[in-house]
Image (cartoon, grey):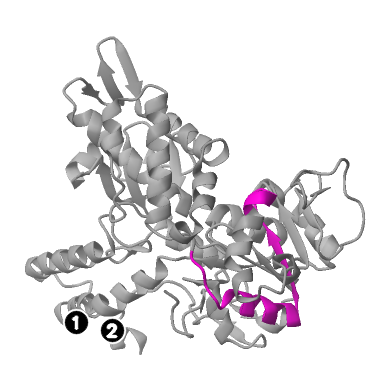
């Protein structure tokens, strides 16, 4: 569901301008999957999960895996999979471990320290740690937990520190991870995921009657383009479904000044690929590199973000790109091109609902600790206030609040601490909301401004400031 008109939030930037003047935007760019084409959850994730399980069984994994059923209440985005120990980790921006799960077993502090002595990981060690940041990652996140749980409890297999043994055969968590990743890629690029989606668009894709209206209004004040990794045929079928029913007299291509398929993001934001023209009758690519000017109605394949700027006659900050992928859409477009960014976070609607409903009690407890228990103490004080009962209360309130989000808690926080995903959003997204459709409720002259934040601070007493 769409958030109220006040929902899109400008994020407090530290290294970038803390505001976004919409009147300076000359081009609106869109991703396709999970942005223009919003997939229904959990139906779409369940489909991807089932197809990946079938793929694993086809390459030799146990038939019992076919009994797995996707549970949307467990996975959240932004988790890190440790390919050495098979754990799913929720970490902060520095790599400090906030939550550790092995299968479906939540690991306690002392056991976490046995594997991670400082409750800390080196996020830069990408050979070992894989960040599961995208909406497409949700099914495999749950599948990792299912597989670890299955092999840990199946009597045919012996659990080892870094994997499982079956007689003389050893399967490491790293090889299991790679099998799942290969299975997901196969389902997306060679399997039947897109085919099954197209066969039942009503089941898997959201249709919003406000979409063509917003695109039309954008087109009145700026140029609009589509840059998607999907191929032309899939893009066309999806666009016909989500855009044209409300305006059958108008072809979907007419809503865009530039259409790029097969973009291959994030490569698209760097060196890119050869820009070719699509034969929209057959869906095939025409021979040779396209070197002509921008032509309305033509569909292109490949290219790069530099080519987009050239074709549209725009510079980096003239463009705002709207997508759901924190790395492939937002981080790369921001760092390499200086584009303004709008991150679509569907989970935000539920996050805000829970936060609004539950955060007051937790905040009151924290405030009481600071304002009452420590009010008259300073560095000369030897006494230590007894806060054990309050700590137990905080732990319960925090746990109850986390469970309202799901088994892995909030996408943005663990207790009072910010997650890695949240820190990336704050750093790279100029705007974020559950749906970009919220822009319909703002004039294109609007100035989005973040709250002024100097630095993260601690609470101080009034005497310290005098």
| Numbered circles on residues, count | 2
Q: Is residue 300 above or below residue 124?
A: below
What percent of the width, then of the height, locates residue 367? 23, 80
Q: Secondary structure at mark 2?
A: loop
Q: Which residue position holds label 2?
A: 461
Q: CA distance from mark 1 to mark 2?
A: 7 Å
Q: Which residue is mark 1?
A: 375
Magenta part of the chain: 206-234
CB atoms of marks 1 and 2 within 8 Å: yes
Is-magenta flag for residue 346? no
In the rendered image, which quarter contains the N terminus? bottom left
**Which residue corresponds to the image point at 69% horizontal and 47% vertical from the top-left?**
262
Q: Give the residue displayed 42% in from the left and 37% down from the top.
A: 52
Q: Is residue 120 visible?
A: no
Residue 360: image x %, image y %?
Answer: 24, 80
Q: Position of residue 400 (x, y in %)?
A: 18, 66
Which picture quadrant has residue 392?
bottom left
Query: Quick check: 286 above or below 373?
Result: above
């Amino acid at each position: 569901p769409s958030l109220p008109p006040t929902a899109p939030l400008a994020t407090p930037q530290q290294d970038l301008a803390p505001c976004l003047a919409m009147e300076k935007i000359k081009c609106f760019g869109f991703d396709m999957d999970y942005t223009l084409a919003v997939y229904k959850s959990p139906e779409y994730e369940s489909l991807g999960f089932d197809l990946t399980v079938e793929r694993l069984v086809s390459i030799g994994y146990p038939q019992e895996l076919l009994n797995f059923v996707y549970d949307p209440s467990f996975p959240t985005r932004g988790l890190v999979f440790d390919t050495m120990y098979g754990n799913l980790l929720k970490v902060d921006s520095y790599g400090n471990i906030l939550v550790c799960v092995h299968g479906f077993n939540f690991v306690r502090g002392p056991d976490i320290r046995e594997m991670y002595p400082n409750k800390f990981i080196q996020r830069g060690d990408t050979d070992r740690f894989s960040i599961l940041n995208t909406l497409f990652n949700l099914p495999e996140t749950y599948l990792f937990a299912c597989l670890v749980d299955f092999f840990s409890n199946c009597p045919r297999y012996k659990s080892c520190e870094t994997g499982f043994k079956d007689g003389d055969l050893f399967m490491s968590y790293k090889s299991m991870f790679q099998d799942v990743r290969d299975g997901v890629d196969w389902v997306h690029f060679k399997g039947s995921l897109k085919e099954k989606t197209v066969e039942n668009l009503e089941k898997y894709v959201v249709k919003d009657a406000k979409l063509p209206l917003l695109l039309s209004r954008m087109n009145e004040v700026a140029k609009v383009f589509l840059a998607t990794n999907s191929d032309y045929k899939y893009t066309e079928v999806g666009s016909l479904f989500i855009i044209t029913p409300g305006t059958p007299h108008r072809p979907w291509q007419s809503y865009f000044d530039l259409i790029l398929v097969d973009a291959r993001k994030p490569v698209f934001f760097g060196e890119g690929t050869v820009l070719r023209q699509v034969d929209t009758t057959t869906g095939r690519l025409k021979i040779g590199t396209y070197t002509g000017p921008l032509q309305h109605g033509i569909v292109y394949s490949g290219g790069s973000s530099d080519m987009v700027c050239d074709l549209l006659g725009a510079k980096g900050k003239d463009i705002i790109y709207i997508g759901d992928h924190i790395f492939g859409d937002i981080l790369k477009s921001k760092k390499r091109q200086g584009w303004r960014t709008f991150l679509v976070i569907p989970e935000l609607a539920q996050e805000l609902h829970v936060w609004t409903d539950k955060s007051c009690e937790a905040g009151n407890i924290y405030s009481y600790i600071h304002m009452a228990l420590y009010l008259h103490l300073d560095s000369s004080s030897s006494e230590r206030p007894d806060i054990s009962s309050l700590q137990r209360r905080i732990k319960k309130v925090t746990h109850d609040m986390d469970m309202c989000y799901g088994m892995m808690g909030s996408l943005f926080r663990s207790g009072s601490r910010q997650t890695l995903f949240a820190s990336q959003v704050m750093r790279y997204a100029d705007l974020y909301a559950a749906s970009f459709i919220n822009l319909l409720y703002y004039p294109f002259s609007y100035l989005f401004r973040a709250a002024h934040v100097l630095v993260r601070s601690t609470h101080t007493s009034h005497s310290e400031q005098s």
